[in-house]
Image (spheres, helix red, strand yellow):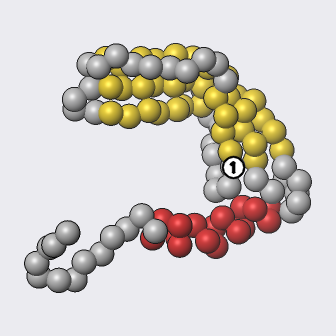
Amino acid sequence: MGWLTKEIERAPCTVEISHKFESLHAHLRFNNGATVYPGDEVKVHGPEMMAPFGEIVTEDREATIIRASGLERLWTRLTGDFEVMELCEFSFSEEVTL
């Protein structure tokens, strides 16, 4: 990985989608042990997956991992905390009003 170049890696993966009352989630696990780092992009290939209510659907797919350049990875680490803080809402009053 260079400071300005990106690398592309293909990896087999397992996609799990749950559409239950107890859990609504989508998880991706790389079957070859690949790890995604800050700034990397992942694209899963194949048709759209939908899980009917009350079921969990699991499929094996192939994913493309586009590795961030060294400069992009550094920028993501430096600015990532600010992006997360945009999701937070703080209130210091005793009474909650909308």
Compare residues 89 and 32 and report the one nearer the observer. Answer: 89
Above/below status of 63 relative to 72: above
Q: Residue at x 51, y 25 (%)?
A: 15
Above/below status of 86 relative to 18: below
Quarter of the image where one finds residue 9: top right
Whether residue 4 appears in this view of the structure is yes
- Kind of residue at disc 1: Asp
Whether residue 12 appears in this view of the structure is no
Compare residues 35 and 69 and report the one nearer the observer. Answer: 69
State the quadrant of the C terminus: bottom left
Above/below status of 25 relative to 97: above
Question: As drawn, which residue projects farthest toward the bottom?
Answer: 93
Residue 67 location in percent, x, y?
A: 76, 47
Question: As drawn, which residue projects farthest toward the left?
Answer: 95
Q: Residue at x 22, y 29 (%)?
A: 21
Residue 77 location in percent, x, y?
A: 63, 67
Q: Secondary structure at mark 1?
A: loop
Above/below status of 41 relative to 94: above
Q: Which residue is mark 1?
A: 40
Callout 1 crowding tier (Cα within 10 Å): few <14, some 14–19, many ≥20: some
Q: Residue at x 22, y 32 (%)?
A: 22
Q: Residue at x 39, y 19 (%)?
A: 51
